[in-house]
Amino acid sequence: MNKKYKKVVVLDSVIFYPEHRDRLNEIAEEVVEYNTCETKEEVIERVKGADCIISCWVDIPNRVIDENPQLKTIAFWTHAFEHRIDKDYVLKHNLHVSSIPDYGTDSVAELAFVGLLQLYKNNENVPVLTAMNNPRHLQEEIMAKVTDDVRKFNKNWRDNLRGSWVHEYVKAGKLKITIPDEFKEETLKGLTIGLLVNDDLKEDLFKIASHGFRMNAIYSLGDLQHALNIAYRPIDNLLKESHIIIYDSRSVNEEIKKQD
């Protein structure tokens, strides 16, 4: 079977999962990968004979286009790429240039709102909150803690300040990620959150978890108005199904607290 490309050259540490590699192998006779490129001369040497180039952080000089008339496609594993290549020069040579259209994924949206919750939580002017003086703000405090535990926002922020930035290690070719499990963080979307709290807290926690972060929300030890995004579970089922459990220590007995 004729494949679309004879030779694909990947110039830096683009993160490919197994399904991505399978797709590349379907459309290319040969795939050559490099961790990174240090000089313009190295780029020019490595792309010789390629009809497709994939890059993220590596600049593509015009000489690459001049010396590779067989080149068909230059793809960028990033959104903004005009600073990596002379786009007008490439288009004049009738090459296809592609990139990621935007970073508008669920994961990015989650992180933005996790950050907003952390800003509110860490604001020194915010008084100590309890269910008595402001139950809605207490629920935001709870969700700030839950979302940070999953997305590790504060840990990553501190690591970045110390120069321990996973993304930078990938960029510099010092770290290769090949499967999703190599990322420590999880997205909140799709996780099941079980609530064992009083009714004053429960409804707004559901709104933040379900409507805000698109988590699967279930509850027990109480009752709520039925809705498509709210599900009741007997307590044993809730404990088994939940990735995250929020409970009010006044509402559950010691036996339930001790269960994993």
Image (spheres, grey):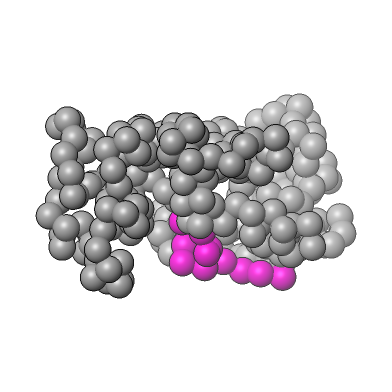
Q: Please identify the quadrant where the N terminus is shown.
A: bottom left
Of residues 200 and 239, the one drawn nearer to the viewer in this rendering: 200
Kindly indicate the quadrant of the structure image that contains residue 114: top right
Which residue occupies 36% across, 33% down? 204
Q: Main secondary structure of the magenta part?
A: loop
User: Is residue 8 positioned above or below 115 on the image?
Assistant: below
Total of numbered circles in the picture? 0
Question: Residue 70 in the image: x percent, y percent?
Answer: 65, 47
Which residue occupies 53% across, 63% down? 183
Residue 64 seen in this snapshot: no
Residue occupying the far left of the picture: 234
In this rendering, position of residue 70 left or right of residue 218? right
Of residues 22 and 177, the one drawn nearer to the viewer in this rendering: 177
Residue occupying the far front of the picture: 132
Q: Is residue 175 magenta?
A: yes
Residue 15 seen in this snapshot: yes
Question: Residue 96 in the image: x percent, y percent?
Answer: 61, 35
Which residue occupies 57% across, 66% down? 177
Q: Is residue 25 magenta?
A: no
Which residue occupies 46% across, 51% down? 146
Residue bounds of the magenta highlight = 174-186
Question: Residue 88 in the image: x percent, y percent?
Answer: 76, 27
User: Is residue 143 positioned above or below 26 on the image?
Assistant: above
Q: Please identify the quadrant where the C terminus is shown.
A: bottom left
Question: Residue 25 in the image: x percent, y percent?
Answer: 45, 61
In this rendering, position of residue 147 left or right of residue 175? left
